[in-house]
Amino acid sequence: MLSLIQFSCTNFNKDKNAIDSDAMKGKYELDLTPLIASLVKDEGALVGLVLSSIKANVSFYENNRGVLELNGKIVDLTAIFSDEPIDKIHQFGYKIENDSVFYLKTNEKEGFKQRAIVRKLGDNYEYLEFSFILEERDDISLNLVKIGE
């Protein structure tokens, strides 16, 4: 009887807007337009033009692991002229707490850091909005559109 009550409370009282990291799994295209607009305002149109050629995809996997992939002409051009190799793929760990707070871990030496508030833009996980919490500039919201599993 106790198990039935616990199951009922867990499933029927769950917030529909809470983010489930398992349901979030998949590959998303990252819309960088709000970030570019913010940088254009601060740095100028040339920076915006350069950054608008960057294409970014984010993949979320099981075990709270993820990958950020950067592509585009400016990334390729930078790789050609750089003395150091340019990493186009960045692995990270993540976790979601309090239904929507996104914590990011970019290397094994550091702990998780609170980086964004995540919300679904609809009833499913096809469209996500990440409102990033940045110390050095205004907060920026970026949209992710699911493009694959």
Image: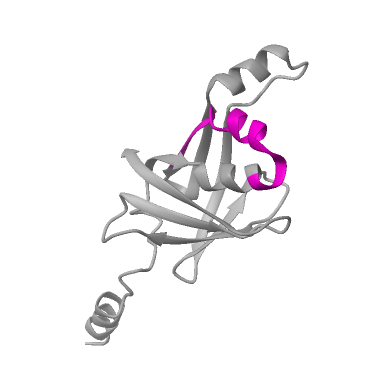
Residue depicted at 46% across the width and 66% down the height: 100
Q: How many numbered marks, from 0 up?
A: 0
Judging depth in this view, the residue of 143 and 11 nearest the camera is 143
Q: Which residues are magenta?
A: 41-59
The picture places residue 108, in percent across and down from the top left corner, at 67, 45
Task: Tell whether 31 sits left or right of 10.
Answer: right
In the current view of this chain or complex, which residue is farthest to the top?
A: 80
Task: Tell whether 5 sits left or right of 134.
Answer: left
Judging depth in this view, the residue of 90 and 61 nearest the camera is 90
Determine if the magenta segment contains residue 42. yes
The picture places residue 102, in percent across and down from the top left corner, at 53, 59
* Image quarter hosting the N terminus: bottom left
Here the colouring is: one colour
Residue depicted at 63% across the width and 16% down the height: 77
The answer to whether one can see residue 106 in this image is no
Judging depth in this view, the residue of 22 and 41 nearest the camera is 41
Quadrant of the rendered image containing residue 136 = bottom right
The picture places residue 142, in percent across and down from the top left corner, at 49, 50
Residue depicted at 34% across the width and 51% down the height: 127
Determine if the magenta segment contains residue 56. yes
Judging depth in this view, the residue of 103 and 129 nearest the camera is 129
The answer to whether one can see residue 77 in this image is yes
Residue depicted at 29% across the width and 80% down the height: 13
Task: Tell whether 135 sits left or right of 6.
Answer: right
Vertical arrangement, residue 74 with respect to residue 27, above or below: above
* Image quarter hosting the C terminus: top left
